[in-house]
Amino acid sequence: MVTMTTVAAMAHVSVSTVSHVVNGTRPVSPETRSRVLQAMDALGFEHHPIARSLQSGSARTIGLALTAASNPYWTDLVSGIDLAASAAGLSLIMVDTRDEPRHEATVVANLLAHHVDGLIVAPSGGWEGQLLPMLRDRATPYVLIDRTGPVRVDQVAVESEQSSAAVVEHLLVQGHRRVAVVTGAPGLSTSEDRERGYRLAHARLGVPVDEALVVCGGSTEHGGRSATLRLLSEIDPPTALFTSNNLMTIGALGALRQLGRRVPDDLALVSYDDFSWAEVFSPSLTTVAQPLRDLGRTAVQLLVRRLNDPQAPTQIVRLPAEIRHRESCGCLA
């Protein structure tokens, strides 16, 4: 079956770009649009499956709302959702929330105006103020993915706290007593879980946490660089660092290069989120890898279950992460 993922691969664009071309949900440059349309023609992908399904009533449509453009982390997640939705006979409309609560509420309202049958949402920090009341006012079922909340609704995420604790504990067991953490954007459950894991590892081994070694990187590359520069300017700098998402890891590596520091000789480094080039860096990066395609597939399964049985009990699913030991932590150096 030809899916948006297949088209995206041929056109060398993201799945979100294909979605915007297909559904007209966001402007796309003429050159990129032409490349996507050519790939669709070559693969035999229907240009307007959603419009046709709405006219015929032959298929259900679901909406996906997440910050698609700002982080390559989402690529495999979206691919998993797209493949699972296609296999279930569902059409998919995707919108970019930009991780801004007001914009998030606007684009989800647009999805609801298109009468989607269900929603998969990776909520922004502060979503409870605008988006949550809107969703509660509507009968449209939805599933939270990746980022969770204290609401009685189907949710699927990776178990972040224990996996973060495990990778930080690995550094502590190697003898590091000044392990720093670059935390993610405030208000996100993933940021909170990973910081709790960092603290849990210290508690397990009886190592006090120096609060000067806990610095927010805002989940961005720039924030990761700034936080790392700040940490390494301390009178007693850390000997090891845990960066709690992939963008902040890139920023941290930039800071280390700027300062002429070597990994792991001068600073051991571990990261949350694996990515395709983590293994080809020198040294290769020790990471916590998330099962992103499984995450996307599970979200679709939960939503299909809810569509088929609105009275089904709420399910909260936590998928395990995998620690991939490489060279940057120092244990293989």
Image (cartoon, rainbow, N blue to C red):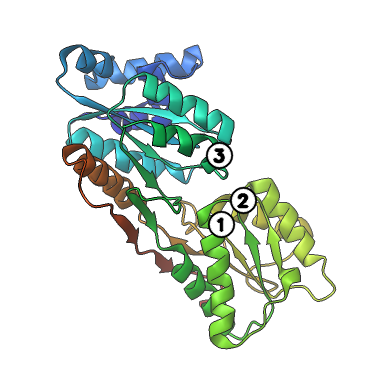
Relative height, residue 140 to residue 32 (above, below): below
From the top left corner, tell me how far across and down residue 195 is, in percent. 58, 65
User: Closest to the observer: 242 or 139?
Assistant: 139
Which badge, 1 or 3, comes first in the chain's sequence? 3
Circles 3 and 2 in contact, beta carbons < 8 Å = no
From the top left corner, tell me how far across and down residue 303 is, in percent. 26, 41
Residue drawn 46% across the image and 50% down it: 147
SS at badge 3: helix
Residue drawn 20% across the image and 17% down it: 53
Q: Quadrant of residue 140?
A: top left
Question: Label 1 belongs to which residue?
Answer: 191
Q: Crowding near pointer 3: few (<14 within 10 Å), some, many (20+)?
A: few
Question: Label 2 belongs to which residue?
Answer: 185
| Relative horizontal placement of residue 42, taking residue 138 as reference (left or right) | left
Can I make out residue 146 in this image?
Answer: yes
* Quadrant, the C terminus: bottom right
Which badge, 3 or 2, comes first in the chain's sequence? 3
Residue type highlighted by circle 2: Ala
SS at badge 2: loop
Residue type highlighted by circle 1: Ser
Circles 1 and 2 in contact, beta carbons < 8 Å = yes
Question: Label 3 belongs to which residue?
Answer: 129
Q: How far is the residue under mark 1 from the one under mark 2? A: 6 Å
